[in-house]
Amino acid sequence: MRFDKSIINYLNSKTYNSLSYNTKSSYRYGLLSINDTKVYGIPMARKILERIDFDICNELYDTWEFENSTANANHLARVFSVLMNYYVDREVIPRNPMKRVKKRTSEPRSVIWKHEQVMSFLDTAFTDFKWRNIGLIVLMCYEWSQRPVDIRNLTFSNINWEDRSVTIKQTKRGATVELPITDELYPMLEQQEKDWGFQQYVVPHHRASDGAYRPLTVLQMTTLLKEVKATAGLPDDLRVGDLRKTGIVQMIEGQVDHLAIQSVTGHKNVSSLNPYNKFNLETAKSALDRRVKCH
């Protein structure tokens, strides 16, 4: 069986269709990405499922890591294994060859966006309608120090227009935070409601899928992000997920009270903010200056 045919069969299976929408989207776009990956110059689509071995899987993993990141390679390896295990269970293949590939761990990211980089990204994103929603995601992640998953799933029902606030129930921590909408952001959200109010999501993908508008998937978001960064001439290593850390670090450096920061970030314990503390010349100078003034 050709690999591309094996994907089609899986996507039409009851096993796949019993999954949640978000899981199905993640698997579908992951499998399509795998399908297009070239191994030894040949797209995976043309490979024969029963002939995929450890060497091919090892090359796949190395290719994903080189072209994107270790985290991306690990994600695609997991999605690939879902497909392989599906056919192992049906005795089409004897084993999952990806299982033997040694996965690597990625170093904790330390990338922080500069304010000018955020502004440059937004200036570029807001020049094209297809980029507008990724621009708004970047702006809201930066303004509110929230994770991309919570912003891309934001609905108009989360917005209190009268109070100019937004309520977000965080996916990871389960915390609910209520955040103010700035004077700059408010008219943008009003425009979103005018343009997209016929459906529920504040920043959906600009094209409908299966007759409905959906939140941007991780792959769609990554693709749009790369397009805007390339056009704006920004470093390729900037990611939307770095904006939460950027905002938290800026609040800490601005000497915002940690309890106040928690009300924004949803952290339950002050100690959870410790990884965001940056020990640099500015913070050291500020601490020493305040010590001198106290004596």
Image: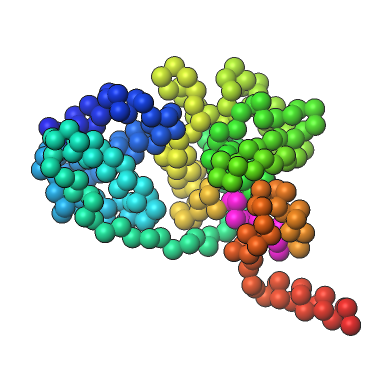
Which SS type dominates the magenta stretch? helix
Residue occupying image coordinates x 73% and y 41%: 179
**x and y percent of residue 36 in the render?**
26, 39
Image position of 194 with respect to 285: above or below: above
Nearer to the camera, 209 or 272 = 272
Residue occupying image coordinates x 67% and y 57%: 269
Residue occupying image coordinates x 41% and y 34%: 23
- Can see residue 98? yes
293 relative to 233 in the view: left or right: right
**x and y percent of residue 164 in the render?**
77, 33
Residue 287, by quadrant, is: bottom right
Nearer to the camera, 19 or 10 = 19
**x and y percent of residue 167 in the render?**
69, 35
In this rendering, the count of numbered labels is 0
**x and y percent of residue 105 in the render?**
38, 60
Look at the image and say whether residue 250 sits in the magenta stretch: yes
Nearer to the camera, 231 or 277 = 277
Magenta segment range?
A: 243-253
Q: Quadrant of the N terminus?
A: top left
